[in-house]
Image (spheres, rainbow, N blue to C red):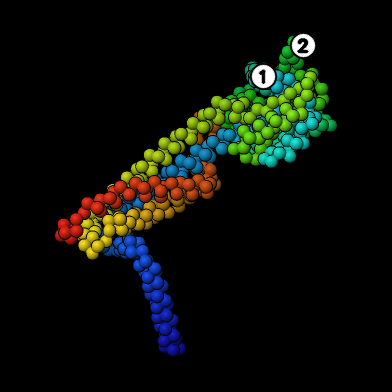
Amino acid sequence: MENQRLPGLCAKSTNVNIKKRYFYAKVDQVLLFNTELFIARRIFFARGTARKFSESIVSFAVFGIAFGLFVMILSVAIVTGFKKEIRNKVIGFGSHIQLVNFDSNSSYETIPVQENQPWLQEVRNLKGIKSIQRFATKPGIIKTDDEIHGIVLKGVAPDFDWTFFKENLVEGSVFSVSDSFKTDDVLISRQVASLLRLKVGDPLYTYFLNEETNSQKMRKFRICGIFSTSLEEFDRLFVLADISHVRKLNDWKPDQISGFEISIDDFSEIKTLTQQIRNLTLRYSKEDETVLRPIAITSKYPQIFDWLNLLDMNVWIILGLIILVAGFNMVSGLLILMLERTTMIGVLKAVGTGNWSIRKIFIYISTFLIVRGMFWGNVAAVAFCLIQAKFGIFKLDPASYYLNTVPVNLKISHLLMLNAGTVIVTLLMLLVPSWYVTRIEPDKAIRFD
């Protein structure tokens, strides 16, 4: 039986080999229409001694491209990830845009506004608006037997989005807010809890000053949860409570608040939406009525966002230096390839091949090398980013960096732009060394050893 199967197997194997040879013949036939590409392919895919001593130099150039692209992708992913994480934490405490009384200053003692505004529905209907929530603030002091600490009591309403604080909750739970009853539960940060030696379930004694009556008020709360965002400036400041407490502490009416917090879908649209909201509120404003002004989070905390914007300059410097280094690696590799193929260049010139055609051969070879290096650079960078995002292997000191792990923000658009930029800049740099071909004389090149 085995002997009977052999002829069939041999015939099948022969057919496969014929198809392979036919395929490669067709590829070569197509490449012959582009002679430079055909020759470059033959040289690039040569094996054994055909590559000669240039193989190690070319491999180093490929490694330079791969490592350079790896570092560039990581630089962009880490910096954009860092900016995104810090930005989201700041926004978590105050949303993207705040609408407050026009006469309110930069302190947390605000002038109240009415929560029922005629333009609210139109603002909700604006494209890009995610949510609107009410808030109120009151500065005060926490006092224990041994310590005191200044805080801002932020009152939240039933429409408050707890997503951010649930993600950063380390102990306990968040509290529920209702218009029908008032809760004494509050949320404090781990930093405040550690400073005052408090834990979940402990009472929290707070004191507030009414500036109009110059009287002091005391409130006793119960700690129901502890959060930690690693943003020291905000963690040590804010305590979240029911908005009804803030209204009573400020002697406000039940329909008065400090303002509105507006969340948007796309951070890049914050300026446009701030202007649109300003136009809407001004259109509804009347004489002898409160005028509201929208404040973007970038304007409320300019020191933080200006610092984050400075990181962009660092990234551009890193990208520029790495591309230059990788480009020079490829330049040296190309020069060595041309030096090794001097005899071939002389023969091609002797049969009438133009300088530009010969230059194209080596540019094609360099393109193959760049693509190979970029492939491995992309694979390594994407793998690193995915592993770091999943497991958080590399840690950070929260006291210095506001984050526990190295953040990564891997986007397809960033990958495409970095790869395209690497190819374009490197190939442009290779045009200069390829000019060396024009200096080679056929008669001397053929005798070159």
Task: Tell me the distance, in whole angstroms, between the alpha carbons under discs 1 and 2.
Answer: 20 Å
Numbered mark located on residue 6 in the image: none
Q: Residue at x 41, y 50 (%)?
A: 423
Q: Residue at x 27, y 61 (%)?
A: 353
Residue 360 vs 408, above or below: the answer is below
Q: Classify 10 Å Cα crowding around label 1: few (below 14), some (14-19), many (20 and above).
A: few
Where is residue 204 shown, x and y percent of the image? 71, 23
Q: Classify 10 Å Cα crowding around label 2: few (below 14), some (14-19), many (20 and above).
A: few
Where is residue 9 shown, x and y percent of the image? 43, 82
- Give the residue type at disc 1: Asn
Q: In terms of image quadrants, where is residue 14?
A: bottom left
Residue 199 vs 417, above or below: the answer is above
Q: Which residue is mark 1?
A: 105
Q: Which residue is mark 2?
A: 213
- Give the residue type at disc 2: Thr
Secondary structure of residue under mark 1: loop
Q: In the figure, is residue 119 to the left or right of 227?
A: right
Q: What is the quadrant of the N terminus in the image?
A: bottom left
Q: What is the quadrant of the C terminus in the image?
A: bottom left
Residue 224 vs 368, above or below: the answer is above
Residue 312 is at least partly visible in this image: yes
